[in-house]
Image (cartoon, rainbow, N blue to C red):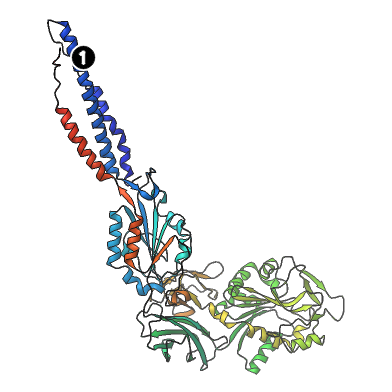
Amino acid sequence: MTFLSPAFLWLLPLITLPVIIHLLAKRRSKLIEFPSLKFLRLLEQDALRKFNVKQLLLLIIRTLIILLIILAFSRPNLDVRKGFRLNTKAVDLMIIAIDNTASNQANLEEMMGTWLTSFSSDLQEKGFIVRFTGITDFILVEDIFEIEPGYGAVFSGNILEKVSDQIDLERYRQKSIMWLGDGQDAQNNLETLIGWDKFVLLSTPEHDGGISSIEMPTRGLRLSEEYQLTVGLITTQDIQEPLSVKLAINDKRQNQATVHVEQNFIEMTARVIDAGFQEGEVTLGYDKYSFNDIRYFVIPAAGSIPVQILRRAQGLDYWSVMKQSIEDLDLNVDLRLLDYSEIDNLDLSRGGTVVVEDASLLVEYNWNRLEIFVKQGGQLILFGDGGEYMRNLLGFSNPLLEESSRYPLGLYAVDDIDTQILGDPIKAAILGNRLKIYKRYDLGAGELGRTWIRFLDDQPFLGATQLLDGRLVWFNTQFHPQAGNLPLLGIFPTLMVQLIQSQDLQDMTRQYNSEIGDTLHFNPQANEGENTPFSIQRPDGTVDYQAPDSLYSIHYSATNLPGVYRLMRGRQSLERVAVNISVHEAQAHGRVYEYSEPDIFVTDEKTSLVREVLDRRSGIALWPLILSILLILWVVETYLSRIKSTWRKNV
């Protein structure tokens, strides 16, 4: 048995009031003059007997009346499912979780209609405490209209902990959750709620299509060059008519195509009309709902793959020779040479490749910036030993020990070349013993994630490791003729171009394309003496101002809208990031969710859901019975209190 208003039970001590009044109001004996003592004794015995029986009954009845009044206000409820166990917790809790993610916005208005308001009112009348929440954040509210459509994904944290932080779950005798939406991620989240009643109302989107993905170029783009985009599409089965797809670059419409319902992908051609960033927008037309009909992208079309080289001044500047060779061959590589004194002028926002000729000259501040650069899709090529920080990034467990060759012909490298990346002419140089290394580092038990060239004793000479979206490449030697003849070989420029072009440009463009909910990372160029504040222009036209951290990076987390976010300094646009809803949310979800857990009641009919919820609310209210007993006791008490004491007739 459960008391729905247990606070009134604190009034139970009031049942002692009739006893206290009885003790304080004892009748005093009257002195009656009578000629016979015998009649006086009989009178006393008869009066005491009548007083004791009558007063005792009245005392019991009045005590019961107060007790029942308190119980009636406490609203006792008998739960048939749980037997006659006493439960002083409050009431049932019902959390109505509404799918307000992008994939369900087609059904959101219908789900939040008058039926849900009426149903929640019925639940409250039956003793439920009802709270509403959107599944993107699981913040509980009392008003359903506080739930707003969003573009984020389903809340990824622990739902039970999130709810417990907002309300005291121990107060409630039974907890229930009702999940309304297209069913995505419902089972995984509901399985964590042990002991709860769980209900799912499925509402499948109708006449809906979405753009699920965009495959962008994997090479650098030049002015006036054409390139292909592969657009992924998904539609609900009820769509039969063709759909229109439009492509705009930098707010200029460039292409349009008609898509038939059986097509899952479509190729679209674009052209680089304006130099610099290509801000793209693909729109699916003639659709009933528009929440997932637009995808944004940014391609850094600066003309060529950006490469920045940090090097020391030497007698022969090999990098200048390499740059001239690249220009003569008209390769799509934009090579920029910097001295170590210009390290703060590295423009890491451009992506591409950064080459460090001597890693030992980098300090912790430089390593932190370069680590962020690699994680966001850049490529970092290192020569030499950069100390503990470099070893940690490359995954080496032991310090590097420099050793020199005991042989005048140098250390031998062996043919362990991955032909997908490194082939001729470097392979021919190794087979012909033309690659000579005089100084290298012993890794001990350490090993690169991927080795392209190794020494005869199994030590790696050239290899790489992945770091999130980017790649770290390491040469196991110093970059000067005393350490090896690699800079002198005519194959060196070819080798470097292969490494530069083999880095997947799809990874490079990921730093310009993100999802809602991510923290955007901007790495503005450090210009000495520049005091103009940085601003971030949001897709809705609003502007936020933010300063970089100690690593000269800006971390912006207010990415709650799809579109292009621009890092500005004054009127100059420094960096851009295209933000979209996730691929999962962009889908037009059909009935694809299966529920194996028997504790989850799943239906697509509102009437079935309402019936099931109310049937499980099987408690029997006892307060009407208590009121009936109170009425009977009041009648009995009134009758007894009016009976007068009489003399015994038989003396």
* On-image quarter of the C terminus: top left
Q: How many marks?
A: 1
Is disc 1 placed on a helix, strand or loop? helix
Above or below, 514 against 199 in this view is below
Between 214 and 523, the one nearer to me in the picture: 214
- Residue receiving disc 1: 45
The answer, for residue 325, to whether it is visible in the render is yes
The residue depicted at 53 percent of the width and 75 percent of the height is 524
Instruction: Tell me where residue 440 sits by quadrant.
Output: bottom right
User: Is residue 488 rendered to the left or right of residue 218?
Assistant: right
Expressed as whole percent of the image width and height from the top left, the position of residue 38 reads 17, 7
Between 38 and 466, the one nearer to me in the picture: 38
* Tag 1: amino acid: Gln
Label 1: how many residues lie within 10 Å, few (<14), some (14-19) or many (20+)?
few
User: Is residue 417 rendered to the left or right of residue 512?
Assistant: right
Above or below, 248 against 75 in this view is below
Expressed as whole percent of the image width and height from the top left, the position of residue 399 reads 74, 66
Between 50 and 254, the one nearer to me in the picture: 50
Instruction: Tell me where residue 452 sits by quadrant.
Output: bottom right
The residue depicted at 68 percent of the width and 87 percent of the height is 320
Expressed as whole percent of the image width and height from the top left, the position of residue 612 reads 35, 60
Q: Residue furthest right?
A: 407
The residue depicted at 54 percent of the width and 80 percent of the height is 509
Instruction: Tell me where residue 414 sits by quadrant.
Output: bottom right
